[in-house]
Amino acid sequence: MTSRNAADMQKTFKLPLLPGQTCGEELLRTNFRKTQLLSGTGERSLHLKEVPVDFDSTRISQTAAVGLSGSQRGFNGTATQGSSANQQGLDRRVLRFFGYFTESVTESSVEKHRVRRVILCYFLEDDTISVSEPRQDNSGIAFQGCMVKRHQIPRADNTGIINFNDLAVGVDLSFYGRTFHLTDCDAFTREFMAQMGAPMGPAEEIPSDAYATTRAPKTKPAVGSMQASTNASGMKVKLSASEVRAAKQFLENDRRVLRLKALWDDSTNLYGHKHFFTLYYFLADDTIELVEDYGANSGKDPFPSFCRRQRILKPRPGGLAGTGVTFGQKEAQADAPAYTDADLRIGNTITIFGRDFLLYDYDSFTRDHLKQKFGIVEYNPINVADPPKAPIKREPPPYNGYGSEEDSLVSWRSLDMKPPRKSNDLYEKFGDSTVKFSLKLDNGVANDENRRFVLSCFLADKTIAIYETVLRNSGILGGKFLQRQPVKNPETDQNFVASDFYVGQKVVINKFPFEVIGTDERSLSFMEANSSTFNKSNINAAVAKIQAMLLSARTGLAQAFRDADSAKLPLDVANLTTAFASLGLEVSQQELITVLRFFERNGETNLTYQVLAARLLDIDERPETYDASWEEVLRARSGGDVESLSVRDRVEAQTRRVQATTAAYAARAFAEQYQQRRHLFHSEFKFITDYSTDGKIGEEEFRAVVTQKLRLPLSDAQVDALAASMFPPRSRRITFEELVRLFNNNSNFEHNIAQIKSRRE
């Protein structure tokens, strides 16, 4: 720095001239413009014709080999300031050649080799070469683009580097293990090489390979007429007759679709079944689409369509039936006969892709279309559904004897084994109630004739237990014979219940034959009170049965009763059983016991056979018999049809008398209890009347008070007969005050207690 500049800086910046506190000369610059190197008068703007004729690429190669640019060394290899390759007009001058190389393909069944195109660029200023491959979409080649970066490439024989004298159209250029065949070059290269005295030959065609052939775009078929050529070029101004018809059909029927139901029966093949489809026919262009109807939980993949929208050809002899025709095919094939709406009828079969589809139904729009266009009015859809299969009844496996049967069935009903659930319905109805019967062995063994057993039936859980009574000096120990448990009935394969046992029955329990010979008073009363469960203790059923036998002349029961009175036989269960058995009439001892208990309980003592018959039929004279079986008479009593109507009328009259008699006996017992517990009767009936919806009492309330609150010693049949008599159809519901008048026999009605006791219909 001069002293003048330092003084100027001192004046300008006021800084001391000390080390580290001075500024450079750059701070004194006021012009920051950059020089222009690309002016129109420099060497870089030289045209191709300004290239010297005595140009030698060898000198440039030698100069560039030492890493110096053309601005530093001349053609003779000496460093100069003004002599350079740029001065010779070669800066940014590039020769471009086109070529290819072949690459073998070993893992393909389509091709053995592939031809890969390349572009080779030769830079004149420093003899460098770059090779690149044009990118191609979906070629499968991972690395395309720059293949060889720009640099000087040595020859394959190590005699130097490749220069522009080695480049020409039609030559093979080998380096880095590959051989590139040059097939063409650009216009600049041809002109440049021609000025250098090495003109290029004609361009060569790059050979094709199998891959390029398969990927080549399909050419449209040749157009043979001027009209077709005009149409293909977009210059068409006139439509043909077929195109006019197609356009008219589209404009008239666009968005109009016929929908039909079709069936393909494939059940004849192995694992085949019926396939149900919906066929759509598009009126706009006479195309068909077929969609399969998948049921719930069918297990099939829901494909969008079985047959996509297209024209379906009709089957032709010797050809594939039902072949589809896609758009854009040849005119000759498109004009082949195809299915139209004239072929769509219920019952017709159309063939699509070799499968026969039966048309069995269509919608209302299709029905209207066929009616308007073809005049089809009949509509008879075909029922193609399979007949309902009989439900498979799951039969439980036989009991294996381990544990209880209910516990064993749990593993059969479900894999998730849980303890069997017990029902409390029977326990809530019967509680701890039991009925007992006396049994004897019926095996014909003399040593077992005197053995007696007591069978206890537990109604709450349908179990039974058998105990053997102890007989002194019999040699047989008594006690528990069968522990309480459910037992199978070999006849019904169901567990025994209490209603299966009655006096006179023969049963087999665990392979031991037994005969029921009796029961106790408490069990009889319980069974009569629950006659709906124990049908053999139902007084109404037993009386109706014996009445039918007495009225039938074919049974001979009435004559047997007269003969028994003549022989002065006592009226007991044993003699009655013998009389019915001798006539072949099926009446159990339990039913006879129920009948005798009913009449003895109501004051009928010292009964005879004739008196019993009179009480049963409610007549004093000899009964009139009819020539009919007792089963027909019994059906007539219950409303069935018999040949003689007089028999039915007679039986109905006798039934009314029996009901009146039953009501009379019930009214007598009710009156006795009413006189003894008058205050309790009033309070119970008053309570249920106050809580009724209308403040009155009817048959249901009367029956509930008598059976549940007062617990009178009356059977269900007696309570029903008494309730029906006290509440006739003309007065179904009455007030509490009127009910008390009926009890006290001072009512204006004709059905008070006193009248019911003495009434005979």
Image: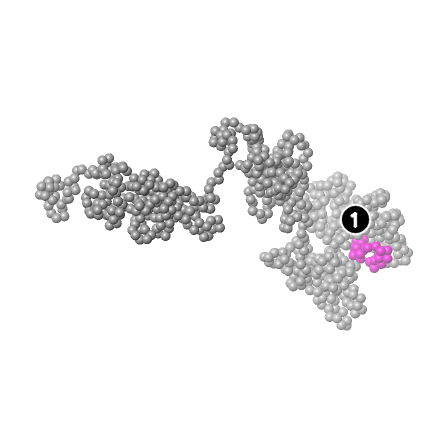
Looking at the image, residue 183 lies above or below residue 502: above
Q: Is residue 533 visible?
A: yes
Q: In the picture provided, is 231 more to the left or to the right than 585? A: left
Quarter placement of the N terminus: top left
Name the spot of residue 552 as percent of width and height, x first: 86, 49
Q: Residue furthest front?
A: 197
Q: Residue at x 37, y 45 (%)?
A: 170
Q: Which residues are magenta?
A: 573-599
Q: Secondary structure at mark 1?
A: helix
514 vs 537, nearest the viewer: 514
Residue 144 among magenta residues: no
Q: Residue at x 70, y 61 (%)?
A: 487
700 vs 51, nearest the viewer: 51
Kind of residue sitting beneath label 1: Thr
Quarter placement of the C terminus: top right
Disc 1 residue crowd, few under 14, some 14–19, many 20+, Cα 10 Å? many
